[in-house]
Amino acid sequence: MNTGITSNTRSCDWLWPLLKHHSLMMLLGLLLSLIALLSGMGLLSLSGWFLSATALAGLTVTTAQAFNYFTPAGGVRGLSIARTASRYGERLVTHEATFRALTTLRSLAWRALLPLGEQRLGGERRGELLNRLVADIDTLDHLYLRLAVPLCSFVLGSLLLVGFVAWFDPAKALLLGGGLLLSALCLPALFYVLGRRASRGQVQGKRDYRIALLEYLSAQGELTLFGAREGYRAALDERERTWQRTQAWLASLNGIGLGLTIFIHGTLVLLILLLVSGGVGSNQPPGALAALLLFAALSTMELLSPLSTAFAQLAGTLEAANRVDDLLTAPPGVQFVSQGPTVTEGRIELKGIDFAYPGGAPVLKGVALELAPGSSTALIGKTGCGKSTLLSLLTRCWEPVRGEILLDGRPLTAYSEAELRRAITVVSQRVHVFSASLRDNLLLANEAATDAELTAVLAKVGLGHLALDCWLGDGGRPLSGGETRRLGIARALLRDSPILLLDEPTEGLDRHTEAQMLRLLLAHCRGEAGESAGAEGAAVGETKALAKGERKQGRTLLMISHRLTAMAQMDQICVLEQGQIVARGDHAQLLADFAPYARQYRR
Ligand SMILES: Nc1ncnc2c1ncn2[C@@H]1O[C@H](COP(=O)(O)OP(=O)(O)OP(=O)(O)O)[C@@H](O)[C@H]1O
């Protein structure tokens, strides 16, 4: 079984549709970048020529009067306006294109993340996922902004510049072209190699720091109680320093790159200066054309300068792209059909189910179980014997290794995900309280429920003292463990599904409340109004607030429990031991025939 979202094969198939989707804007950005570059180079060359030509024209009255100042002056002004405007437009358009592409990519990543489920994401840490969704995707802005745009501008700008110089003097154009080509071959390769480790280290360092920071923040309570906060903080600081060291090396590389570019550029300009002093083409002496070529050579700085920076960080960018690729191309943990039948009865059959977590020992061995529609079954057994695992097979968080699960006589795989979620209500061991109002926390279970229905349910589970507008969770009122359980039960009561799976729903509640909650859940499954836990609930229980949600035929109930409360009310009790059902029957049968059950019950 393949798990996790890391793969060794790369397709990056998502990149091309993404580029295609934003291609117009990206091309416009590229065009504006090229216009800005060419107008900058044109401005420098024309200004150089204009100054020299003006100076030379002023040597005699005749040449001074014959010289046309206006056209080049207009050209200088036009180019400077074009340069400013296109540079502004380029920044605007390229950043807009990048942000749009990243937005699309982020929503693609979310869409890819959701179907991965427990199987693929179970082993991933929260910080790691956050990192893939935020930092790795952000790093990809480098691909277009700092790599594609400067590189295309370099190639097109160089060709046009060399062609322009060749028009006056092919030999000097050859030198200029040769210098640019050599730089294009050496600088990227050199800085890719020099920056490879550091740029990967930077991506890795950021990831490690984020993960450790999230863990540190969410484990504050534990770290404080065990006096481990300082040690953990020191480890966190050390990670930050490692990350900063890679950043410092990359910054130094940028400096070295700039220095080297200035050196190459200076050498090129010097060589051109030496050559133009001997004449430009057939112009001997060269006159103002010497300045034109010299300033044209000077303008290559704009072409050369982004090369070293872009390639120093390329390895890190590719690393981030690979990690995003892993996420976007990971196959879903479980495949659901898009359309399927509807669950009506709620009959469940498990036939010869074997299951093991990837790389782990067998957890379930040949489990066979039948739950009749509207029946109630308790699954009991020691910690770690596989009870919760069995529930996660019923909800298709995992697939059995062998055997078959039937729902209303059809394989579980025949149902769409939406239908399965509608048909099965789960109260899991961990009830998540959202940082939202109590109303919103309840509406999660049934969006259509009215305030009267919500209030009635709250009264039933003994939370009638809380207002619906009361803010819960991280940013609001913290609920006690017992209150959180009651909230989970309230959510289950709000749902009208034919099947109810309960994973130790009353864990942490006192015996009296536990019995009360179980009576409530059993009444809900039988389609009765049920009793209320609070005094005010009695009145509300009489209302027909929940009438819509009550089913005539009753709901199929499967409840996992450690304790034997309410077992007498169960139609069937199964005892699971090391992944196998070792005893089954109703309460009276097990008391009579299965000694460990009788012993536990009497304890
Ligand atoms: N996602 C997982 N990956 C690998 N092993 C797992 C995973 N979840 C559970 N296990 C292992 O499978 C075994 C059965 O776990 P399970 O949670 O089903 O037991 P349980 O009977 O529900 O226990 P408890 O009563 O304590 O909740 C345990 O050994 C557990 O460590």
Image (cartoon, grey):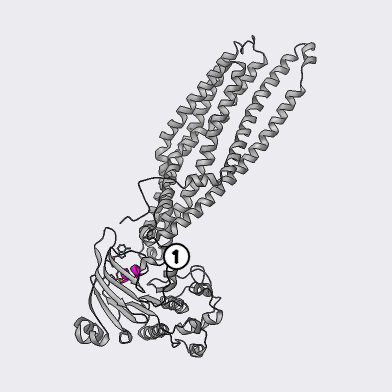
Q: Is residue 580 above or below residue 313?
A: below
Of residue 264 and residue 421, the one placed in the foreground of this image is: 421
Residue at 75% from the left image edge and 24% from the top image edge? 71
Determine if the magenta segment contains residue 383. Answer: yes
Q: Which residues are magenta?
A: 382-401
Which quadrant holds the N terminus?
bottom left
Which quadrant holds the C terminus?
bottom left
Q: Is residue 498 above or below residue 306?
A: below
Task: Give the percent coordinates (x, y) of residue 392.
Answer: 35, 68
Q: Secondary structure at mark 1?
A: loop
Of residue 120 and residue 310, the one placed in the foreground of this image is: 120
Task: Give the percent coordinates (x, y) of residue 183.
Answer: 49, 26
Determine which quarter of the picture holds residue 302: top right
Task: Give the percent coordinates (x, y) of residue 288.
Answer: 67, 16
Determine which quarter of the picture holds residue 124: bottom left
Q: Is residue 333 visible?
A: yes
Determine which quarter of the picture holds residue 381: bottom left
- Amino acid type indicated by mark 1: Gln
Of residue 390 and residue 455, the one placed in the foreground of this image is: 390
Residue at 46% from the left image edge and 71% from the top image edge? 433
How would you classify the magenta stretch by its main secondary structure?
loop
Q: Which residue is mark 1?
A: 339
79 to the left or right of 242: right
